[in-house]
Image (tube, rainbow, N blue to C red):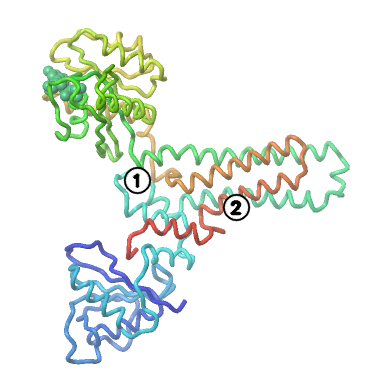
């Protein structure tokens, strides 16, 4: 590859330092051209301090910045090519001036890098596979400890190893199937019992492999939670304390709390990182009967929010008898399995008219908490609720760095395709179809898994993957 690419790799804005990154055969030439007093012999991976100028051969050249020059010789670099980092001051103006000097250095084929191009090169040069490259962007975009943990373990190759292990089992099986196909006249095919034994052994292995793929797919819900957060929906009649609960969970007063029923007309979304896990809270208009158009829209959204949530938190004013409106909420919620419900009987400080049992008889699987969401009780109530969320979703036992977790939609799609093809192969063998046909499905499964790590993916997939990246990565 004869091109050399360059970009400002640090985030725009003022910063302590800023880095212009270069990859390609012209890297060393650029360093010599731009660093005033650059030694004849540049040692790779050594930090050189010097002035940045447009042309070091011109003693009159204006100084652009002072910087540390770091030359890395391929293949021992991020991209696998020769690379240069010019670490200057974190000023937009000086970094742009350095970049201009790089692009105008007169070295052959130097151009601006495209977003993600450094990482794309790393992938193309075999420094990492595609799932590892995708983890790089996940690390940059991580919004919680949990998503960072998953991304980091993926970058280290945990998912790749699991996928490669499954593929190697498939490859063994494919080899055996090929023998059965290529030598159908062999003795074993004259013997029906023997043939059945072979087919049933293939079926057993396919089942085992399919279950391994399924295990990976099962982790996708954790992956989604890490990426998007736990969707917790707060439901209850007006004035029960929903906004207060949301504030308590968020730890600060972001939602307006008022005494007028029905003021939170729309659903309000807030994201909080709770114990390293992002939680999306949707405060709702409740489920009242109303003729008010705006409120009706809010109610519709409540229904949608409940349907797509991981956790539903129901809030009751425990100081008053359960009324018609509470009943409407309960009736509606009885339609769902209540094992992901947390019922909060609020306003304990004002009295305890509503008992845990009153709620439990209606929603038998729900976790019930009696509490007060104002004053000193709020923090403790919030902690109780967070603990309950972790217990219900079994998040406390998840060690993201020790497990292989799938957190990427593209990977989920490929795993589903692999699973479908494996199940098809099993069905075919079971119904006595020829081995060739089943083998083809196994082959598809093998290819689908390969796409996770970037084997046989087209330019289109690569473009989609790397377009998520920022410039300079
Ligand atoms: P929402 O309409 O369900 O969102 O309810 P809010 O959170 O806006 O609360 C309604 C009113 O009840 C506000 O004045 C809150 O301060 C008050 N409130 C909420 N929780 C408690 C509680 O545990 N004890 C007492 N005494 N008042 C509370």
**Residue 288 at x, y = what percent?**
27, 18
Seen at 26% across and 19% down, the residue is 291
Looking at the rendered structure, the secondary structure element under dot 2 is: helix
Quadrant of residue 72 within the rendered picture: bottom left
Left or right? Give the position of 93 relative to 417: left
Q: Is residue 293 left or right of residue 431?
A: left
Sequence-wise first label, 1 or 2: 1
Position above or below: 66 against 466:
below
State the image coordinates of residue 222 (x, y, percent, origin top left): 40, 38
Task: Find residue 173 and name its label.
Answer: none
The residue under label 1 is 147
Q: Secondary structure at mark 1?
A: helix
Q: If the picture is divided into quarters, which one holds ligand 1?
A: top left
Q: Left or right: where does residue 183 sit relative to residue 142?
A: right
Q: Position of residue 352 (x, y in %)?
A: 19, 10
Cα distance in 3D space between marks 1 and 2:
28 Å
Residue highlighted by disc 2: 447
């Amino acid at each position: 590859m004869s091109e050399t690419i360059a970009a400002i790799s640090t985030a725009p804005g003022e910063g302590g330092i800023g880095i212009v990154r270069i990859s390609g055969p012209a890297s060393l030439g650029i360093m010599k051209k731009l660093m005033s007093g650059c030694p004849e012999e540049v040692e790779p991976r050594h930090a050189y301090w010097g002035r940045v100028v447009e042309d070091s051969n011109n003693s009159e050249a204006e100084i652009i910045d002072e910087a540390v020059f770091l030359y890395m010789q391929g293949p021992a670099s991020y991209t696998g090519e020769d690379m240069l980092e010019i670490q200057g001051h974190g000023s937009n103006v000086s970094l742009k001036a350095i970049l201009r000097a790089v692009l105008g250095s007169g070295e052959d084929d130097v151009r601006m890098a495209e977003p993600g191009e450094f990482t794309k090169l790393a992938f193309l040069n075999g420094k990492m596979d595609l799932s590892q490259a995708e983890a790089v962007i996940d690390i940059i975009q991580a919004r919680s400890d949990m998503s960072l943990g998953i991304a980091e373990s993926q970058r280290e190759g945990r998912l790749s190893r699991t996928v490669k292990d499954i593929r190697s089992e498939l490859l063994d099986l494919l080899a055996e199937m090929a023998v059965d196909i290529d030598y159908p006249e062999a003795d074993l095919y004259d013997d029906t019992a023997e043939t059945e034994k072979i087919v049933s052994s293939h079926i057993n292995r396919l089942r085992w492999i399919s279950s391994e793929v399924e295990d990976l797919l099962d982790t996708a819900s954790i992956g989604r939670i890490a990426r998007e957060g736990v969707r917790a929906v707060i439901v209850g009649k007006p004035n029960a304390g929903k906004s207060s609960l949301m504030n308590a969970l968020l730890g600060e007063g972001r939602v307006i709390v008022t005494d007028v029923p029905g003021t939170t007309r729309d659903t309000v979304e807030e994201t909080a990182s709770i114990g390293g896990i992002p939680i999306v809270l949707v405060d709702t208009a409740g489920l009242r009967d109303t003729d008010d158009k705006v409120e009706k829209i809010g109610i519709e959204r409540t229904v949608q929010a409940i349907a797509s949530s991981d956790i539903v938190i129901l809030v009751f004013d425990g100081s008053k008898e359960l009324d018609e409106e509470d009943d409407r909420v309960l009736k509606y919620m009885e339609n769902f399995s209540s094992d992901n419900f947390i019922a909060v009987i609020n306003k304990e400080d004002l009295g305890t008219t509503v008992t845990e049992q009153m709620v439990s008889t209606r929603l038998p699987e729900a976790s019930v908490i009696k509490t007060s969401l104002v004053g000193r009780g709020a923090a403790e109530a919030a902690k109780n609720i967070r603990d309950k969320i972790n217990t219900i979703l079994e998040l406390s036992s998840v060690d993201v760095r020790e497990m292989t977790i799938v957190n990427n939609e593209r990977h989920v799609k490929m795993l589903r395709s692999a699973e479908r093809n494996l199940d098809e192969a099993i069905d075919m063998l079971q119904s006595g179809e020829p081995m060739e046909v089943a083998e083809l499905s196994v082959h598809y499964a093998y290819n689908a898994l390969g796409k996770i790590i970037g084997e046989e993916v087209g330019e289109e997939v690569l473009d989609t993957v790397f377009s998520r990246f920022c410039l300079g990565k």
